[in-house]
Image (spheres, rainbow, N blue to C red):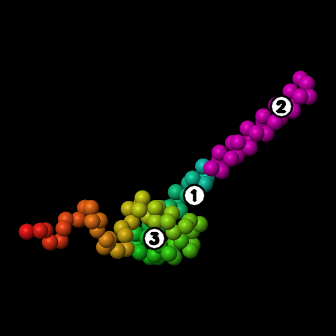
Amino acid sequence: MTSTEKEQREARDTLAALSAAYTEAEKRLDKAREALNEGIVAVLKARTLGPSEVTRIVPFERQHVGRVAKAGGVPPLRERTVVSAKTAPPANPPA
């Protein structure tokens, strides 16, 4: 085996080991993200903390916390008050 072949084998082995470590770290991150999302949903469903307080604690922006909550089935704090003019029937139909 030449020194070039040996260097190439070592380079492949190094990259394979680093790739395996990276893949394992991604799996741990996915599990941690899922656990955090479940925690966010549980806290918001229990109304222990509001979305603003949750946002101050977790590493996500408010919009992402809202997406997590919606995906987890957290009901909104207030019902919608705005109704689309396209879907709402007229208040006083013409006679």
Q: Amino acid at mark 1?
A: Ala
Most extreme residue toward the right is 3
Residue 68 position, x and y percent, is: 47, 61
Q: Earlier in the sequence, mark 1 or mark 2?
A: 2
Choose between 61 and 7: the one closer to the eye.
Answer: 61
What residue is shown with label 2? Answer: 8
Q: Amino acid at mark 2?
A: Gln
User: Magenta stretch?
Assistant: 1-26
Numbered tag placed on residue 43 in the rendering? 3
**Nearer-N-terminus badge (3/1):** 1
- Magenta portion: prevailing SS class: helix
**Which residue sits at x=14%, y=72%?**
92
The circle drawn on residue 11 is none
Residue 35 makes an appearance in the image:
yes
Task: Pinpoint residue 39: horizontal percent, then vertical percent.
Answer: 49, 65
59 drawn magenta: no
- The amino acid marked with disc number 3 is Val
From the top left corner, tell me how far across and down residue 28 is, in percent.
61, 53
In this figure, which residue is indicated by the disc labeled 1? 32
Sooner in the amino-acid sequence: mark 3 or mark 2: 2
Residues at marks 3 and 1, CA–CA distance in whole angstroms: 16 Å
Q: Secondary structure at mark 2?
A: helix
Q: Residues within 10 Å of mark 2 (few under 14, many from 20)?
A: few
Tell me, yes or no, whether the two marked residues, 3 and 2, touch with CB atoms within 8 Å: no
Secondary element at tag 3: helix
Mark 3: few, some, or many residues within 10 Å (few <14, many ≥20)? some
